[in-house]
Image (cartoon, rainbow, N blue to C red):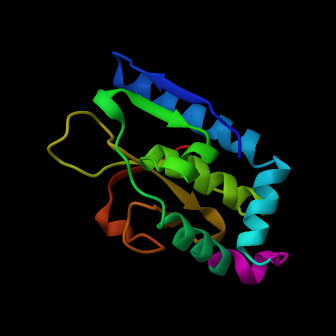
Amino acid sequence: MPELKIFSYVHKNEREAVNFRLHKIRGIIDLCKKDYRWILFTRNLLNNKNPDRSMYDYAFSKMIFDFLKKIPYRKDVAEIETIQYPGLTLEYGGDCDDFCVIGGTMLESIGISVKLAVSKQDPNSPGLYDHIFLIIPTLEDAIFDVTAPAFPGIKTLYRKIKICY
């Protein structure tokens, strides 16, 4: 998949940085979920099954989660936050925001809606939030976090969850 865009940014104000990050991630998901290549890629991964909302949201979310767990986690370089298109994450790996982009793209390309959420994972890290992940509203706000050991993520392990878009 030929997407080659990467957004990098540095903000002095943390709220501005978080809002920018969330806005960019949501924009990329909304753009890529309509791309026939991602729709076909995701359906092929799911063996071309046509998902029925009432029965398959959990099973398909779990299959996509398990697939994404095989992609390497890579931190951003030199403390500069970057957000990349899903094709780059598929090829090179990425961090939590990159996994939100590819996970959100794949889930929404088959009709499973997601919301973005932020949390404070490390109590010693500066700032309000240091982690981003997906929430699946149709699964009682299940946490879809590829950096977590399993799907769905365990809510008690997340501090200060804020569901955004």
In the image, taking residue 119 as reference, residue 88 lies left or right, namely right
The image position of residue 155, as x and y in percent, is 38, 67
For the point 66% across and 68% down, the residue is 138
In the image, taking residue 125 as reference, residue 47 lies left or right, namely right
Does the magenta-highlighted stretch encompass residue 6? no
In the image, taking residue 142 as reference, residue 110 lies left or right, namely right
For the point 55% across and 37% down, the residue is 84
Question: In which quadrant is the C terminus drawn?
Answer: top right
For the point 40% across and 30% down, the residue is 81
The image position of residue 86, as x and y in percent, is 61, 46
User: Which segment is the magenta one?
Assistant: 48-58
The image position of residue 37, as x and y in percent, is 80, 52
Task: Give the answer, above or below, for where 14 lies relative to 157.
Answer: above
From this viewpoint, is residue 133 visible? yes
The image position of residue 33, as x and y in percent, is 75, 49
Task: Give the answer, above or below, for where 158 lies relative to 91.
Answer: below
Does the magenta-highlighted stretch encompass residue 55? yes
For the point 50% across and 32% down, the residue is 21
From this viewpoint, is residue 111 visible? no
Please identify the residue farthest to the bottom as the structure is shown.
Answer: 55
